[in-house]
Image (tube, rainbow, N blue to C red):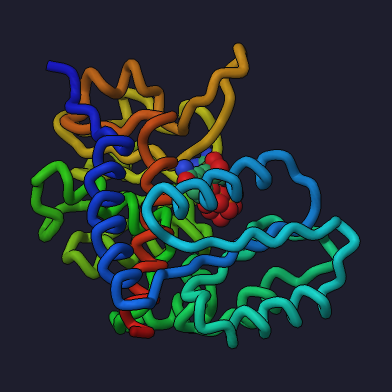
Amino acid sequence: MPAHIIDGKALSQTLRADVARRAAALSAAGRQPGLAVILVGDDPASAVYVRNKVKACADNGLHSVLERYGADFTEAALLQRIAALNADPRIHGILVQMPLPSHISALKVTEAIATHKDVDGFSVHSAGALMAGLPGLLPATPYGCLKMIESTGQPIKGRHAVVIGRSNTVGKPMALLLLQANATATMCHSSTPDLALHTRQADIVVAAVGRRHTVTAGMVKPGAIIIDVGINRDEAGKLCGDVDFDAVREVAGWISPVPGGVGPMTITMLLVNTIQAAEAAA
Ligand code: NAP
C-alpha cells in the first residue's frame, strides 16, 4: 500500500485556524499581534517569500509591516531599523529575510533582534535555549516538521530518527527537537560515507539537503516516516524535494510532498511564533 501523504497544506489550515482564534482574542484585548518583515535587496525569490508571509498575517488577523530597502542599504541603517522595531510595542516578531547582501553581516543582524521578538529562532540565544531544553522561540521549518511527524499519530519516543543536513536553521535544530522528543537522533551530512546505511535503519527521516533524489526507495525502511524539506527543480523546471517521491512512497508509511508539505508549514509556524511572542508580551 502506498504511504499516507502528510498534507502540509491541510495541517497548516488547522493550525492557522488556531492562530486566527488566538489573534482575535489578543486583538479584542487591544493587543493585536504584529510582525515586521524586512527585505533588503531585490532577490525575486525573497520577494515572493516575504509577500507570502505578509499575506498569511493579513489572512489570520495579525498586523504586519513590510519594510523594503535597496541592495545598497547599509548595515548600520538596518541595525537602526531593528532597534526601532525592538522598541515598538505593536511589533511582537521581527523577521529579516535571508540572504542579505554580502556587505551586511547576517550574524550581526540576527543578534540585533530582541530575543523575545526573534520569531525566526535563528539567534544564538534561541539556539542555545533549544540546546539547553529551555523555553524559547523555535526555528519555523524544523518546528513545522515536528508538527508533521506528530500528525502521523506515531510515537517519536524510542524511534530512530535520521536527519540529513546540519544547517543551523534546519538540520541541527531538527535533530535537537527529535532528541528532545526522546528519539535516538542521528545527523548525516556531506561527509557521511554511507548515507543509506543510516537511513535504512531509520523510523523517521528528515531530508534537508537541497539535492534532488538524495533519498531513494532502496534507502528507506518499510513503513518509515519521511519528511522532505528540500526545494529543488527537476529537468522540466518543476518544483521537487530531496526525496524520490514516487518511488519512496511505495516503501514508506508516511511521506510529505513537495510542494504542499514543509513549505506551508514553515509560514504557519512563523505565525504561531508571533502569536506566542504576543501572548508572552501581553
Ligand atoms: P544548507 O545550509 O545548504 O545545508 C545543506 C546540508 O546538506 C549541509 O549540512 C550539507 O552538509 C548537507 N549535504 C549536502 N550534500 C549532501 C549529501 N550528498 N549527503 C548528505 N548531506 C549532504 O541548506 P538548508 O538551508 O539546511 O536547506 C536545505 C534544503 O531545504 C534546501 O533545499 C532549502 O531550499 C530547503 N529549505 C526549505 C524550507 C521550506 O520551508 N520548505 C525552509 C528552509 C530550507 P555539509 O554541512 O557537510 O556541507
Task: In the rendered view, tell whether residue 174 sits above or below residue 227.
Answer: below
Given residues 54 and 183, the one toward you in this image is 54
Q: Is residue 106 left or right of residue 277?
A: right
Residue plotted at (45% across, 54% down): 57
Residue 96 x, y percent position in the rendering: 63, 64
Question: Residue at the right extreme?
Answer: 72
Residue plotted at (54% across, 52% down): 54
- Kindly tell me whether residue 243 is visible in this rendering: yes
Locate the N terminus and report the quarter of the image it occupies: top left
The image quadrant of residue 227 is top left
Q: Is residue 35 left or right of residue 44?
A: left
Q: Is residue 218 left or right of residue 251?
A: right
Label tally: 0
Residue 238 x, y percent position in the rendering: 55, 19
- Kindly tell me whether residue 191 is visible in this rendering: no
Question: Residue at the top extreme?
Answer: 236
Residue 154 x, y percent position in the rendering: 9, 46
Residue plotted at (61% across, 14% down): 235
Residue plotted at (16% across, 30% down): 253
Question: Residue at the bottom extreme?
Answer: 87
Residue 45 x, y percent position in the rendering: 67, 40
Task: In the rendered view, tell whether residue 94 sits above or below residue 134.
Answer: above
Given residues 43 and 254, the one toward you in this image is 43
The image quadrant of residue 78 is bottom right
Task: In the rendered view, tell whether residue 93 sits above or below residue 194.
Answer: below
Given residues 238 and 29, the one toward you in this image is 29
Given residues 239 and 174, the one toward you in this image is 239
Locate the C terminus and report the quarter of the image it occupies: bottom left
